[in-house]
Amino acid sequence: MRIAVSSQNFRTITSHAGKSRRFMLFDIGPDSGITERERLDLPKGQSLHDTQGPDHPLFERGLTHLLTGGAGERFIERMAARGIEVIQTSEPEIDKALNALAAGKTLPPAAPHEH
């Protein structure tokens, strides 16, 4: 599993994934091992919301999942069309959320997303 985490501060899971320009990328292996692969700090105008075409840096990284504190329905549909499952959670701690996913546990749901 290759997962991107929306994190505007590189410390916690943040919401509005479509407007985020900072992501942390992790691999979760078959042995449930978690490895941080990369941090993206994209320039202004490079959020997924601003980049509507197929050429976005996140799409080049083989993602299977995107973990966020919240996202809109159109964003979720757009990611699904690219084969990326969006996981929304109210859990703010990245390590805690990734360990739960690696263990096959369900994360606490995110608050309703308001646009």
Image (cartoon, rainbow, N blue to C red):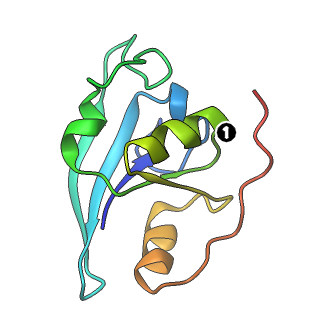
In the depicted view, which residue is nearer to us: 97 or 2? 2
What residue appears at the point 31 percent right and 25 percent down from the top-left corner? 54
Left or right: 84 in relation to 35: right
How crowded pointer 1 is (Cα within 10 Å; few <14, some 14-19, many 20+) is rated as: few
Is residue 68 visible in this depiction of the protein? yes
Label count reads: 1
What residue appears at the point 62 percent right and 33 percent down from the top-left corner? 74
Vertical placement of residue 61 versus 88, above or below: above
Left or right: 4 in relation to 107: left
Vertical placement of residue 12 versus 97, above or below: above
Amino acid carrying mark 1 in the image: Glu
What residue appears at the point 48 percent right and 84 percent down from the top-left corner? 104
Image location (x, y in percent) of residue 20: 48, 30
Identify the residue at the far top of this view: 45
In the depicted view, which residue is nearer to us: 93 or 37? 37
> Which image quarter: residue 52?
top left
* Element at label 1: helix
Image location (x, y in percent) of residue 101: 47, 75
Left or right: 3 in relation to 98: left
Image location (x, y in percent) of residue 84: 41, 51
Which quadrant does the N terminus fall into?
Answer: bottom left
Vertical placement of residue 109 versus 62, above or below: below
Residue at the disc numbered 1: 73
Which quadrant does the C terminus fall into?
Answer: top right
